[in-house]
Image: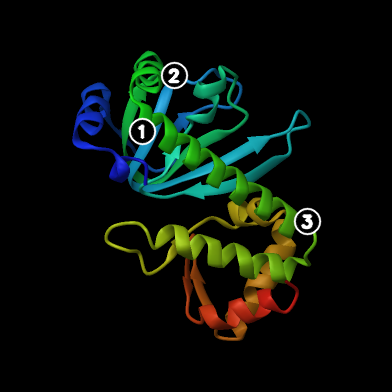
C-alpha cells in the first residue's frame, strides 16, 4: 500500500491535502469520458471498474478493494478516464483533488515513486487478467473470476463471508452472456462449491474452484 511506505513527513503532507468522501451502494465515483477531478484511496468497501464501448457494450474490468488507489493513472497523464467507478456497498475513501495531487507528485519523491510502483502492479494485473480470460472456456473463467472476487472482498474490514456481485456484473467481468454465466454458476452450486442468493455469493470450496482453474492454466 502506497501510504504505508511513506515517511511521517510525506504522509503528513498527503493527509493535509486529502478529503474524506463517502459513497453509498451504486453511487458513481467518476464517469467514463470525464477528465479526473482527483484520486481516491479506498479505505472501506469495493469499487467496481467498468468500461463501455462506443457500441454500448459494457465490460467490468476489475474490483478495487481497501488500500487501492483508484483513478490516479489519468491524473498522471492528463487524459480522460476510459473507465467508470461505482461503489459496491458503502465506500469510504480519501480524495486528493487534482491540483493537490499534481503538487504532491512534484514535491514528495517517495509518494511519486510508490505510485509508479502501484501503477506497474495494476498494469500487470489487468494484462494478465485480459490475456487469461480470452483463452479460457466460461466455466474456467468463472472459477478464476470468483477467486479474484474472493480475494478482493477478503480485504474489506471486517472481512465479508460472501461476495456481492450481480449476475450482470459477474457476466461482464468474465466476458460471457448472463445465461451462460448463470448455468456455470448453477453447476458450481450443484457441486456444493458455492451458494448464492440474489447478489450474495458464498464460496464454500475455493480449492475446488482452484482445481477447475488449474486444469487449463
Left or right: where does residue 99 sit relative to residue 208?
left
Which of the 4 image quarters holds residue 41?
A: top left
Q: Which residue is mark 2?
A: 37
In the foreground, 128 or 9: 9
Name which of mark 1 and mark 2 comes first in the sequence: 2
Whether residues under marks 2 and 3 lie with C-beta atoms below 8 angstroms apart, the answer is no
Left or right: where does residue 181 sit relative to residue 43?
right
What residue do we see at 60% from left, 77% from top? 210
Q: Which residue is mark 1?
A: 110
In the foreground, 82 or 5: 5
Name which of mark 2 and mark 3 comes first in the sequence: 2
Question: How far from the left and from the top, in percent, is residue 211?
Answer: 64, 81
Question: How far from the left and from the top, in percent, is residue 213?
Answer: 67, 74
Marks 2 and 3 sit apart, C-alpha to C-alpha, by: 33 Å
What residue do we see at 43% from left, 34% from top? 113
Badge 3 local density, few (<14 within 10 Å), some, or many (20+)?
A: few
Question: How far from the left and from the top, in percent, is residue 195?
Answer: 50, 76
The answer, for residue 198, to whether it is visible in the render is: no
What residue do we see at 41% from left, 44% from top? 68
Left or right: where does residue 107 sit relative to residue 203?
left
Q: Which residue is mark 3?
A: 134
Question: How far from the left and from the top, in percent, is residue 46?
Answer: 42, 48
Marks 1 and 2 sit apart, C-alpha to C-alpha, by: 23 Å
Which of the 4 image quarters holds residue 10?
A: top left
Amino acid at each position: 500500500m502506497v501510504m504505508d511506505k511513506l515517511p511521517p513527513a510525506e504522509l503528513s503532507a498527503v493527509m493535509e491535502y486529502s478529503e474524506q468522501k463517502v459513497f453509498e451502494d451504486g453511487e458513481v465515483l467518476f464517469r467514463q469520458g470525464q477528465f479526473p477531478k482527483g484520486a481516491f484511496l479506498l479505505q472501506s468497501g469495493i469499487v467496481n471498474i467498468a468500461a463501455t464501448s462506443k457500441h454500448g457494450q459494457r465490460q467490468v474490468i476489475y474490483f478495487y478493494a481497501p488500500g487501492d488507489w483508484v483513478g490516479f493513472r489519468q491524473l498522471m497523464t492528463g487524459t480522460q478516464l476510459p473507465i467508470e467507478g461505482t461503489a459496491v456497498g458503502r465506500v469510504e475513501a480519501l480524495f486528493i483533488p487534482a491540483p493537490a495531487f499534481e503538487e504532491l507528485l512534484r514535491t514528495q519523491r517517495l509518494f511519486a515513486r510508490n505510485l509508479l510502483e502501484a501503477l506497474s502492479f495494476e498494469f500487470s494485473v489487468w494484462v494478465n487478467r485480459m490475456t487469461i480470460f480470452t483463452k479460457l472456456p466460461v466455466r474456467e473463467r468463472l472459477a478464476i473470476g470468483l477467486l479474484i472476487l474472493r480475494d478482493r472482498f477478503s480485504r474489506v474490514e471486517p472481512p465479508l463471508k460472501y461476495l456481492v456481485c450481480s449476475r450482470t456484473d459477474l457476466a461482464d467481468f468474465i466476458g460471457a452472456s448472463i445465461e451462460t454465466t448463470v448455468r456455470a454458476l448453477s453447476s458450481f452450486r450443484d457441486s456444493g462449491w458455492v451458494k448464492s442468493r440474489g447478489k450474495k455469493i458464498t464460496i464454500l470450496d475455493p480449492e475446488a474452484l482452484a482445481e477447475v482453474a488449474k486444469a487449463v492454466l
